[in-house]
Amino acid sequence: MNDARALPITTPLPAGTAGFVSGFSAFLVGLKLVLPGGGLFRYALAPILLSMFVATGVAVGAFFAAKYWMVEWLQESWAGWLGGVLAFVLTLVIAYFLFVPVMSMFAPLFIDPICEKVHQRYTGTDLIGERSAQQFIKRQLFALAQSVKWLLVVLLIQLPLAVSAMLTGVMAAVAVPVSAVIMGADLLDNPLSLRDYNLSRKLAWLKQNFWPAAGLGTAASMVMLVPGLNLFVPTAGAAAATLLMVATASGNPESSEQP
């Protein structure tokens, strides 16, 4: 066992507004950890480079798809310029919403090691330790399933909410918190899955720690809007989610037991 550092967030996690602030603060701590000088940047570098590649590919593909569907049929019209603007806006929206679901496919390679390092830093113990090839393949298949699930959530819930939010202020008031909660729940899935939590235990954990999860998702959603920093969201979110999991385990030792 290694010496553990003091946890940089409140433990046990509070409820209500204080819990929301703890979740928000956890993301900022996670972001600091994966930025240069934070100690985990070398582990975040590979997924950041991959993120840049994925984000560029998604953006280019989305733009040409949008151009084909929106610009071609408007090009002989006086509104042809509007098609170009709409194509650009659609590109940004699609890249924003599809970036994290695509990156979640690579969690076993890039995200899990960050969860492990954060857990070691603040508990002095391993989260998962060495994994056999069979365990890795099982984790990879699970990550693919999670990526598909997140993609469906984006297409069926988050994108319709985003479009509705552009039309009415009432829907914007609904879309923002819903998207934040979804983002927080998905980021927390990484360390909770490494604990071998099944779906019922994950839902129970999220229900018990709703406000910290919402704070985490809100911070991540805001940083996703900042070019450059948005590339750090999957890694910073994984680090922050691990901090929240450690905080709950510190307040309730039974929660750290394997199911």
Image (spheres, rainbow, N blue to C red):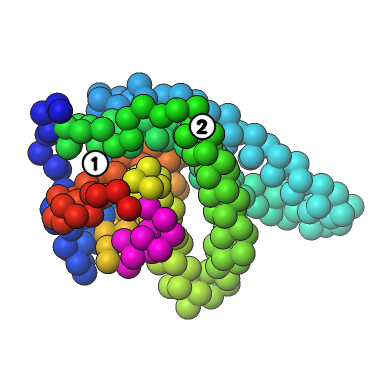
Name the amino acid type tagged 2. Answer: Gln
Residue at 10% across, 39% down: 6
In which quadrant of the rendered view does residue 95 lie?
Answer: top right
Q: Of helix, strand and loop, which one carries label 1?
A: helix
The disc placed on residue 184 is none
Name the amino acid type tagged 1. Answer: Val
Can residue 203 be found in the magenta stretch?
yes
Q: Inspect this view and state whether residue 103 appears.
A: no
Residue at 52% across, 43% down: 143
Residue 76: % across, % down: 89, 52
The residue that label 1 is drawn on is 29
Query: Does residue 221 appear to the left or right of 91 in the view shown?
Result: left
Front-lying residue, 15 or 170: 15
Residue 52: % across, % down: 53, 30
Q: Which callout, 1 or 2, points at the residue further toward the start of the chain?
A: 1
Q: How many labels sit on residues?
A: 2
